[in-house]
Amino acid sequence: FFASSAVVGNYQVTSQLTMVMPMIVGVASGGLLGRISDLHSVGEQIDTVTEDVLNVSVVIALPTLIGGLLIGPQIIWIPFGSKYQMAFIFFLWIAIYRTISAYSNPMGSVIEGIDRPDYALRTQILKFTTNIVGGVVGFYIFGPVGVVVASVLAQLLTAILYARFVRKHTTINIIPSAIRLQALASLVMGVVVYATKAQIGVSEWYHLLILVGTGGIVYGTILFFDEWHRETVFGTIEDITRSS
């Protein structure tokens, strides 16, 4: 309603580019609410099933966010054209939003699964209000990017409230070791990508492919040395092979 078609175009491009970030958690959390509800109804522990989803919640989002930040605007204009150079600021904020959202979604399933949809509803109303009010105010203060910043702040507030509830009412580790390792691997990957960029630059499409490929190899290699990540990958491949 407020923004021009050019701004909407920038938003759509960056939204498409970051669409992959919550993909794994979306698949992994399918049916999570039902499983938690079943376990909770018979007095069983919900820690393992929840932490398994939390472990993969940001496995793609974190390296995408850090890698995109370090590669710079070229990650937008090389695949989509130079007219979208201004879209990079949208990319950063949308990537932050998707990362926070991917992390908080499993905890939302926990809250509803242990029969507290009232808390989830109050949190969502607060998120909606913050998003709408903050978006309008942010637009007039910061311009179009203020709308996205408001969404990030609203999602961050939601994640904090969800995490506070989960820590208070369950024994779930809301920052399991797998997420800490993914954060470390993303930082190491970022250092390597930044050093590679300093050597080759990023002005052509093959430079971008080299940087993305190098980052993916470094990140994947670090995680592969971890037993949980390695067994998860092999287990997923085995399940796919068996089902096909």
Image (tube, grey):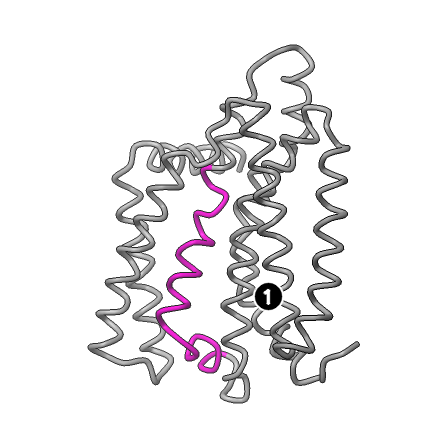
Residue 180 image-quadrant placement: top left
Residue beneath disc 1 = 149
Image location of residue 18, percent across then percent down: 53, 63
Image point (53%, 67%), residue name:
17
Image location of residue 137, percent across then percent down: 70, 70
* Principal secondary structure, stretch drawn in magenta: helix
Image location of residue 107, percent across then percent down: 59, 36
Is residue 170 part of the magenta span, yes or no? Answer: no
Q: Amino acid at mark 1?
A: Val
Is residue 69 part of the magenta span, yes or no? Answer: yes
Give the side of residue 137 with respect to residue 16, left or right. Answer: right
Q: Nearer the viewer, residue 78 or 8?
A: 8
| Circle 1 Cα neighbour tier, 10 Å, few/some/many (<14 / 14–19 / ≥20) | many
Stretch in magenta: 55-79
Q: Nearer the viewer, residue 51 or 145?
A: 145
Please identify the quadrant where the N terminus is shown.
bottom right
